[in-house]
Image (spheres, rainbow, N blue to C red):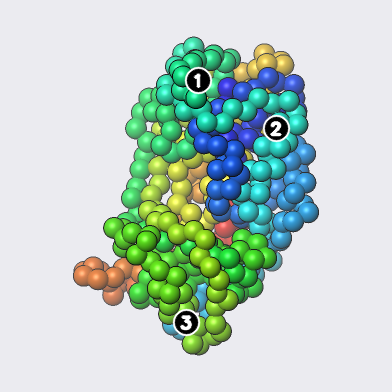
């Protein structure tokens, strides 16, 4: 039983179906919504390996683009890091998450998996593996040998696992903008400005993701297209470089940078994966990669139990995944501190801005620091 049809649930379902395990995926949203939900598209080498080994990388190998460069733009100039040539020499593959999810849904159904959309799970009993839900036909319940909670940070499965998650509100909010426009820069660009952070990430030949640091209580509707492009131009210093390639804004939403890690990922027959296990800020594009990592470990553990009566991998699921989750959280936190300058009446504003400048200087001058960045930026 898998609750949630995001990357974690669909990768898990596909691997299990390929190994002959009967699975059922319950998803509260419609198939159209799931396959069109725009999210991060940066996949690390571990994710690409998992998808390739399990026959799930057809679309990614056809349309994905290798990416190994990022730029930090400040008032003092640009720092370009060719991170694909640093550290372990690993690059990202850019493939929009909605395209990956579409591929995974199709593959799962082709493999004979059962997937029900429009099903809202209302309760999970970890002791019995019983899942209660409501759909267009009313209330129902179904029981499985194991339950995988892949329904996100606010889903019911996390609530069924004892213990409070460790949480942090980073005190930073972004306006996430999706524009029907070609990328303006060849690399992922992080613009550091006293008015707030701005980010540029290509999502496809004609689609670009932008981020703007905003006030937590801002309303997306208050950000008109003119205001968005003006703020992006100012913070990315287009007067010193080159104009942005603009286009219609197709999505705008507020993202509050918060983190949460479950104290344990397993309880009885219930196992958490993806955002249900660990909600991470988008500052370093780790969410989907952590989801795929956990799905592979969980699939191996379930298969070992069902085929060889070997419980060792499943029993160690939390101990295997949590250290990798915390390493990703640490790097994400490091990126947040680097990208966002203090502002307003912060009494430590001068000190913290100088610290940020020192971090960038170290990243520019130290090969050891560059290798560390590269390994953590791509890996998990």
Image-quadrant location for residue 260: top left
The reply to whether callout 3 and callout 1 are in contact (CB within 8 Å) is no
Q: Secondary structure at mark 2?
A: helix
Question: Is there any visible trace of residue 57 in the rendered image?
Answer: yes
Q: Which mark is residue 237?
A: 3
Name the residue: 65% across, 17% down. Answer: 305
Residue indicated by mark 2 = 108
Give 58 or 45, whichever is nearer the viewer.
58
Q: Calculate the distance from the C-alpha at mark 2 to the C-alpha at mark 1.
A: 24 Å
Q: Secondary structure at mark 1?
A: loop
Name the residue: 54% across, 85% down. Answer: 241
Residue 163 position in % (x across, y down) = 36, 28
Q: Would you place residue 181 above or below residue 5 in this image? A: below
Q: Which mark is residue 137?
A: 1
Q: Is residue 217 left or right of residue 101?
A: left
- Few, some or many residues within 10 Å of mark 3 (<14, 14–19, 20+): many
**Mark 3 or mark 1: which comes first in sequence?**
1
Question: Is there any visible trace of residue 270 in the rendered image?
Answer: no
**Mark 3 or mark 2: which comes first in sequence?**
2
Name the residue: 50% across, 15% down. Answer: 141
């Amino acid at each position: 039983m898998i609750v949630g049809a995001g990357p974690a649930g669909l990768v898990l379902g596909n691997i299990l179906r390929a190994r002959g395990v009967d699975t059922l995926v319950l998803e509260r949203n419609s198939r159209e919504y799931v396959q069109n939900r725009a999210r991060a598209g940066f996949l690390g080498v571990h994710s690409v390996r998992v998808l390739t080994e399990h026959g799930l990388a057809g679309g990614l190998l056809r349309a994905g683009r290798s990416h190994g460069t990022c730029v930090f733009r400040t008032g003092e100039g640009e720092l370009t890091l060719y991170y694909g040539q640093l550290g372990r020499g690993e690059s990202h593959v850019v493939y929009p998450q909605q395209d990956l999810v579409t591929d995974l849904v199709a593959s799962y159904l082709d493999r004979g998996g059962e997937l029900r959309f429009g099903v809202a799970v209302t309760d999970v009993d970890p002791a019995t593996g019983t899942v209660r839900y409501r759909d267009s036909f009313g209330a129902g319940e179904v029981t499985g040998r194991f339950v995988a909670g892949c329904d996100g940070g606010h889903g019911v499965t996390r609530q069924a696992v004892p213990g409070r998650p460790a949480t942090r509100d980073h005190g930073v909010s972004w306006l996430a903008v999706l524009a029907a426009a070609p990328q303006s820069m060849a690399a992922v660009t992080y613009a550091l400005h006293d008015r707030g952070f701005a980010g540029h990430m290509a999502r496809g030949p004609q689609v670009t993701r932008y981020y703007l640091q905003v006030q937590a209580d801002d309303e997306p509707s208050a950000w008109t297209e003119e205001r968005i492009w003006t703020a992006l131009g100012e913070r990315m210093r287009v007067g010193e470089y080159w104009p942005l390639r603009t286009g219609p804004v197709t999505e705008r939403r507020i993202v509050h940078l918060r983190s949460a890690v479950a104290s344990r990922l397993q309880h009885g027959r219930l196992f958490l994966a993806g955002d249900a296990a660990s909600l991470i800020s988008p500052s370093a594009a780790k969410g989907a990669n952590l989801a795929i990592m956990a799905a592979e470990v969980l699939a191996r553990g379930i298969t070992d139990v069902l085929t060889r009566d070997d419980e060792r991998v499943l029993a160690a699921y939390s101990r295997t995944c949590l250290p990798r989750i915390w390493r990703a959280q640490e790097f994400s936190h490091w990126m947040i501190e680097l990208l966002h300058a203090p502002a307003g009446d912060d009494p430590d504003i001068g000190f913290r801005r100088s610290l940020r400048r020192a971090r960038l200087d170290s990243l520019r001058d130290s090969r050891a620091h560059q290798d560390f960045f590269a390994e953590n930026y791509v890996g998990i």
